[in-house]
Image (cartoon, rainbow, N blue to C red):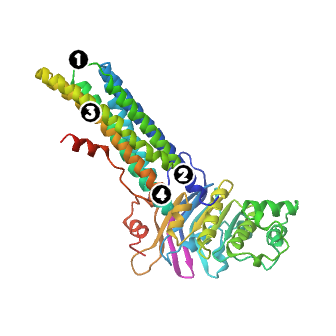
Amino acid sequence: MAQPTNNEPDYILEAKNLDIFYGDFKAVTDVNMKIQRNKITAIIGPSGCGKSTLLRAFNRMNELVPGTHINGEIQFNGQNLYAPAVDPVEVRYRIGMVFQKPNPFPKSIYDNIAWGARIHGYIGNMDELVEYSLQQAALWDEVKDKLDQSGLALSGGQQQRLCIARALAVQPEVILMDEPASALDPIATLKIEELMQELKENYTIVIVTHNMQQAARASDYTAMMMLTDGESRSGTMIEYDETNIIFTRPSDKRTEDYVTGRFG
Amino acid sequence: MIRKTFENEMQQVKDEILVLGSMVEEAILGTVEALKKRDIKGAENILAADKEINKKRFEIESQLMILIATQQPMAHDLRLLASSMEIISELERMGDYAKGIANINIRMGDQPLLKPLIDVPRMAQKCADMLHRALTAYVEEDVEAAKAIPIEDDEVDALYNQVYRELMTFVISDPKTMERANWLLWVTHNLERVADRVTNICERTIFIATGEMEEIKSTDDEFWHKNK
């Protein structure tokens, strides 16, 4: 399987021989994947092939489901994320997540940003942090005069950017995005994609998307997942390469069939 | 600005197309200069330059293909990418005409030119100038310029006819000059074709800007009818 090749690439996350189980069911099989720092990596593939499961393994979010466990290893900055001494709550601060459906807290815009930082023990200037986070999420200009209004009063696209700002407020290194734009209209979608391009200067982004065109437009690298053949079907990664290559000359026939809309 | 990524990448491709255009311009002027001086080394340099032109064209083609695949261009953006694909192919063929002239120069060996070249360099200069302005019009999507430039093709055709008649008088007065006249006729024909391809670039520019795909009336047609 092709891996992205670059001169001295800087990998922030690495899955090694990773299997993910829900109880006895092996949802993901033998994934080996290095994720490059300050790049956008997309995970694509048909429904039920384990994309979101893999994504959630990167910040131990799967553990919120009882019975979930992994074989193999995920390294974050060279450290095993699943080592006994590692606090999963700390992991989720450093590797934040944005979900499909915008889920702001039923609180003011200001408190949506400040809340996580406060819990995390942030002792700096909160006004500055709120403004900085909203600016990073390209939302500041639209909300600066109504910070005390409810986050739920914003449009869907604005709510999603509020959720991104909230994730940024705890200063993560990686942002995982699970279908962040699938509930948004095309313009709001493009805004999120442009925002991702700005965010990659300072963060690493991993995005799961059903929308192949979105992966094509917005990512630097694309990983293609698919179910294995046979009786015990499980998700695995069949190709991983530069996005430009995946969408112009993929090397695996199944990737070709998927990106040309002939399969899945 | 929304779609900033696409805009930036498209700008880079346009810059690359301008680079390709200037390589072709240099080849057209250089190949005629080498012929005028009967400089074989200069002609060989043109052959090498053509390889670079072809390489550049493939690079740009690949960039355009990636943009089409990853950015899903529609409407104006789609016309721009599809037409840019055509334009680089026109440029590559113009490079071949320059190479053709270089090959004639080499094939002529140590035989002298049938006549000193006066109008041929003029043709080359006119072609290079039209090409330069046609590519500026493409980058700026300047429809007025794109409509005006093809009219100048008449000047190239007039020079072509003039050289043609001159060469025929040589042949009539001394049939032994046939081969040397033929060589120069091919040279002028190649240049005349360059100007025609400039017209194609202008057609594409108009299409990008307006969505109207229309052939600009070819003055060649009149030439063939007149000389029937």
Going from the N terminus, do you reach mark 1 or mark 4 first? 1
Specify the label residue B112 is tagged with: 1
Specify the label residue B161 is tagged with: 3
**Image quadrant assignment for residue A1:** bottom left
Q: Nearer the viewer, residue A118 or B80?
A: B80
Q: CA distance from mark 3 to mark 1?
A: 22 Å
The region drawn magenta spans: A20-31
**Rendered location of residue B154, percent (x, y):** 35, 38
Q: How packed is label 3: few (under 14 Cα within 10 Å), some, or many (20 or more)?
A: some
Q: Does residue A224 appear left or right of residue A99 in this picture?
A: left
Going from the N terminus, do you reach mark 3 or mark 1 first? 1
**Rendered location of residue B128, percent (x, y):** 41, 34
Q: Residue at x 61, y 78 (%)?
A: A68
What's the amino acid at mark 1? Answer: Pro
Q: Secondary structure at mark 3?
A: helix
Going from the N terminus, do you reach mark 4 or mark 3 first? 3
Q: Residue at x 66, y 64 (%)?
A: A175
Q: CA distance from mark 2 to mark 4?
A: 22 Å
Going from the N terminus, do you reach mark 2 or mark 4 first? 2
| Residue position marked by numbered label 4 in the rendering | B210
Q: Residue at x 39, y 60 (%)?
A: A251
Q: Secondary structure at mark 4?
A: helix
| Residue position marked by numbered label 2 in the rendering | B9
> Are callouts 2 and 4 both on one chain?
yes
> Are callouts 3 and 2 both on one chain?
yes
